[in-house]
Image (cartoon, rainbow, N blue to C red):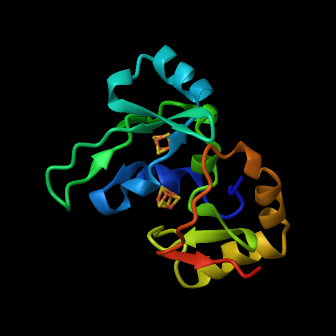
Amino acid sequence: MLKNVLSYKTCADCRICCSFVKEDAWESPVFSEEDMKKILALGIDGSRFQEKEENGQKIYTAKYDFKTDSQILLCPCLDEKSGCMLGDDKPFECSIWPVRVFENKSGAYLGVASACPAFEGEKLEKILHELKENGLEKKILSMKRRLNKVNKEAEGYHIVDR
Ligand code: SF4
Ligand code: SF4
């Protein structure tokens, strides 16, 4: 969805959003039951995920065993050579990175992760323009139901004006 402003190669060379330290492990994607079926069919080790129940639905998140605060661990769906093993079936939240949907009492809104090296300075202006002026914000918010989880936390994000 962000191909006008973010190339596949930039992400393939970076992969920050598929790797986590203890503090930002909350950013790790949430998988639905449907996602988990695909994950297991790909031969990814199911013991690397934990099951939870939220709003009556089963959801899954990666299990990370951080030994130190600075240790970086990879999402179990990441192949270090070829990238995300889920391809086009990755969770919606991963397909819109570094944009994330948040929700509070006033409604849903978007943020752009400040940790993303592709969007600093002028490039940040470019993605904000794409979101606001070229309709991308509306498009993402209209697809919000595809998210497995909407976060309330927006620390570390450039909030897109509503
Ligand atoms: S942090 Fe930004 S550049 Fe890096 S992989 Fe994620 S979206 Fe791509
Ligand atoms: S599911 Fe794929 S895109 Fe999402 S964090 Fe894991 S490896 Fe990265």
The residue under the point 28% across, 47% down is: 73
Q: Is residue 24 visible?
A: yes
Instruction: Tell me if residue 70 comes above or below residue 59 in the rendering.
Output: below
Residue 101 drawn at (x, y percent) = 65, 61
Q: Nearer the viewer, residue 77 or 66?
A: 66
Residue 3 drawn at (x, y percent) = 68, 55
Instruction: Tell me if residue 33 comes above or below residue 20 in the rendering.
Output: above
- The image quadrant of residue 135 is bottom right
Going by the image, does 68 lie left or right of 117?
Answer: left
Q: Nearer the viewer, residue 116 or 22?
A: 22
Residue 69 drawn at (x, y percent) = 19, 61
Q: Is residue 45 visible?
A: no
Q: Residue furthest bottom?
A: 121
Q: Nearer the viewer, residue 129 or 10?
A: 129
The residue under the point 83% across, 63% down is: 138
The residue under the point 48% across, 75% down is: 155
- The image quadrant of residue 5 is bottom right
Residue 145 drawn at (x, y percent) = 75, 46
Q: Give the position of the C terminus as an image quadrant.
A: bottom right
Going by the image, does 139 lie left or right of 28?
Answer: right
Q: Residue furthest front?
A: 56
Q: How many marks?
A: 0
Instruction: Tell me if residue 85 comes above or below residue 100 in the rendering.
Output: above
Instruction: Tell me if residue 19 comes above or below residue 134 in the rendering.
Output: above
The residue under the point 63% across, 34% down is: 88
Q: Nearer the viewer, residue 149 or 4?
A: 149
Going by the image, does 55 lie left or right of 136?
Answer: left
Going by the image, does 92 lie left or right of 30?
Answer: right
- The image quadrant of residue 134 is bottom right
